Image (spheres, rainbow, N blue to C red):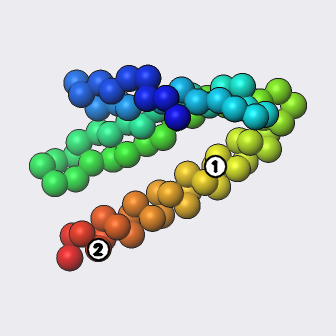
Amino acid sequence: LHVARIDDGSRVLSSREHGGLIRTWNHDIIVTPIDARSCTYRDRIEIKAGPFTPFIVAYARWFYLMRQRRWRALARELAR
């Protein structure tokens, strides 16, 4: 994992990763404030893995879906 950029102004953290079958895994985490106590959080990923790209993309979708579920559960717990 290589953190390539942290932009406080636009609230974006960018990492540039690769390895094994994956030539490119560029990941941006984008946080957008809603109000003083809440925000939206998005993942934007660019994946290049040659003929394996569809499989890696399917894995990434599953992985980030599971991670988002854990974040939401944590947010609910912290809000109590």
Residue 29 location, quadrant: top left
Q: Looking at the picture, does residue 48 appear above or below residue 76? A: above
**Label 2 element class:** helix
Q: Looking at the picture, does residue 35 appear above or below residue 31? A: below
Quarter of the image with the C terminus in it: bottom left
Can you name the residue that lies furthest to the bottom here? 80
Q: Position of residue 69 (x, y in %)?
A: 48, 64
**Amino acid type of the residue tagged 1 in the rendering:** Arg
| Residue that appears at 72% across and 25% down | 23
Q: Position of residue 20 (x, y in %)?
A: 76, 34
Left or right position of 42 against 54: left
Can you name the residue that lies furthest to the left here? 36
**Amino acid type of the residue tagged 2 in the rendering:** Glu
| Residue that appears at 49% across and 29% down | 2
**Label 1 element class:** helix
Badge number at residue 77: 2
- Name which of mark 1 and mark 2 comes first in the sequence: 1
| Residue that appears at 39% across and 64% down | 72
Rate crowding at label 2 as few (under 14), some (14 to 19) or many (20 or more) other CA atoms within 10 Å.
few
How many callouts does the rendering have? 2
* Residue named by callout 1: 61
Whether residue 10 is visible, yes or no, is no
Q: Position of residue 68 (x, y in %)?
A: 47, 57
Whether residue 79 is visible, yes or no, is yes
Q: CA distance from mark 1 to mark 2?
A: 24 Å
Q: Position of residue 44 (x, y in %)?
A: 51, 35
Left or right position of 63 against 28: right
